[in-house]
Amino acid sequence: MKAKNQRLTLLILAGAAVLAAVLLAMSALKDQAAYFYAPGDVAKDGLPLGRAVRIGGMVKTGSIRHAKDGVTMNFVVRDETPETIRVRFRGIPPDLFKEDSGVVAEGRFQPDGLFVADQILAKHDENYMPPELAGDRHKSETLK
């Protein structure tokens, strides 16, 4: 085989290997991708059943209910539309999770419209300061 043909063959094999690696990575990431929905989107587009998704919005005031087992909680997520999503979460919520604050929940919808969350992420505003630093800041202001 001539050197020119060997280089062409190696180039084609390298290109095929790179293409196979990209396709394999895309296939693996497809299962990990979680789409984001707000309550208004779910009402408009319908329930995305059978796949992992993220929902986001504000925790409705007065909606957090803790079950007797101590680890399961139910709450309602709302957005600027009148639509809401009922959520059930089993686990320990983040420290910033509270009523009338932002939340992102990862999980799956049930056919009855209930969202069963595997993970909850609490949102905070741009002025958030960890309690340790906020305490030091308060001390330094009182010393002035």
Image (cartoon, rainbow, N blue to C red):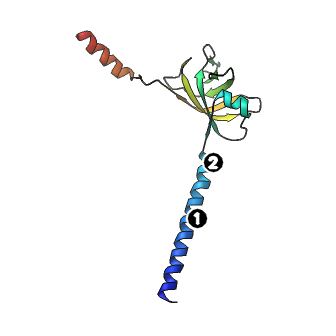
114 left or right, relative to 104: right
Q: Position of residue 3 (x, y in %)?
A: 47, 86
Q: Which tag is nearer the camera, tag 2 or tag 1?
A: 1
Three-letter amino acid code of the residue under disc 1: Ala
112 left or right, relative to 128: right
Q: How many marks?
A: 2
| Foreground residue among 110 and 30 | 30
| Residue at (64, 35) in percent of width and height | 107
Residue named by callout 1: 20
Task: Examine the rendering and report whether any part of residue 10 can be seen.
Answer: yes
Tell me the element at label 1. helix
| Foreground residue among 27 and 71 | 27
When the figure is inspected, residue 119 is found, relative to residue 81, above or below; the finding is: below
Quadrant assignment for the C terminus: top left
Q: In which image quadrant can residue 137 be found? A: top left
| Residue at (65, 40) in percent of width and height | 52
When the figure is inspected, residue 19 is found, relative to residue 52, above or below; the finding is: below
Three-letter amino acid code of the residue under disc 2: Asp
Q: Position of residue 108 (x, y in %)?
A: 67, 35
| Foreground residue among 90 and 42 | 42
Which residue is the extreme one toward the right?
112
Residue named by callout 2: 31
